[in-house]
Image (cartoon, rainbow, N blue to C red):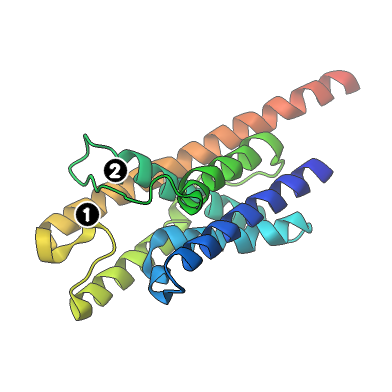
Amino acid sequence: MPIARALRALTAGCALAGVVLLLVDTGGDAGIAVYFTVQSNLIVAAVFGLAAFGRGDVRLRGAATLYIAITGTVYHLVLTNPASPFFTADPGAETVHNLLLHTATPLLAAADWLLVNRDRVRWWHAGAWLAYPLAYLAFALARGAITGRYPYPFIDVAALGYGAVAVNALVFSVLFFLLGLLLIGLGELARRARRAPAVEQIS
């Protein structure tokens, strides 16, 4: 399907460009790799790049879509939302790489999932997809225990303590699971809507 492949190539290119531009902007600082934003965009670049050539599994695309949706949602609703207790002023909010990483790539991935995806996934994949965010949490906490630095304020043990971080982790895990279910549900509704005209024509 040419449109699907073109959209996936664009999504992969957008994600990769965002990471490269961020790397250039930070003077080649490899430390950006600790951020979920960067990791999720690299996952999208790899998964959607393969999908553009007709390779890869729908479950991988679903996982990548969830991770980049988490990136966009947390950035816009938690980190840069003045009403959020974890609001953080972002001096680079207007940069091209920021737009690509936090807005354009999540929207393109969502468009692929809702508009051109024709494959089905089961609801329980929403739980399986949490393996990476939970592994990232373990990594960030272990790294923070050694360096004293945490990539995001809601997992900053030095400022909040382990009890508050544990509560935050539980809340975010539940919300991410629900977001995964929402993606699966919306994807299934869109898939059925696309199939309906074809079934009518056949009958």
Is there CB contact under 8 Å for labels 1 and 2?
A: yes
Q: Name the residue nearer the viewer: 101 or 164.
A: 101
38 left or right of 109 in image: left
Q: Residue at x 43, y 53 (%)?
A: 127
- Work out whether 51 lies above or below 3: below
Crowding at dot 2, Cα within 10 Å, few <14 / some 14-19 / many 20+, comes out as some
Residue 9 percent coordinates (x, y): 71, 53
Structural distance between the alpha carbons of marks 1 and 2: 9 Å
Query: On the image, which quarter does residue 84 sit in?
Result: top left
The quarter of the image holding the N terminus is top right
Residue 168 percent coordinates (x, y): 21, 52
Q: Secondary structure at mark 2?
A: helix
Residue 113 percent coordinates (x, y): 62, 41
Q: Residue at x 83, y 45 (%)?
A: 2
Crowding at dot 1, Cα within 10 Å, few <14 / some 14-19 / many 20+, comes out as many
106 left or right of 133 in image: right
Query: On the image, which quarter does residue 154 sit in?
Result: bottom left
Residue beneath disc 2? 78
Residue lying furthest bottom? 146
- Work out whether 129 lies above or below 122: below
Q: Residue at x 42, y 57 (%)?
A: 130
**Tag shown at residue 177:** none
Residue beneath disc 1? 154
- The three-letter amino acid code for the residue at tag 2 is Val
Q: Residue at x 54, y 49 (%)?
A: 65
123 left or right of 11 in image: left
Residue 11 percent coordinates (x, y): 64, 50
Query: Is residue 56 visible to us here?
Result: no
Q: Earlier in the sequence, mark 1 or mark 2?
A: 2
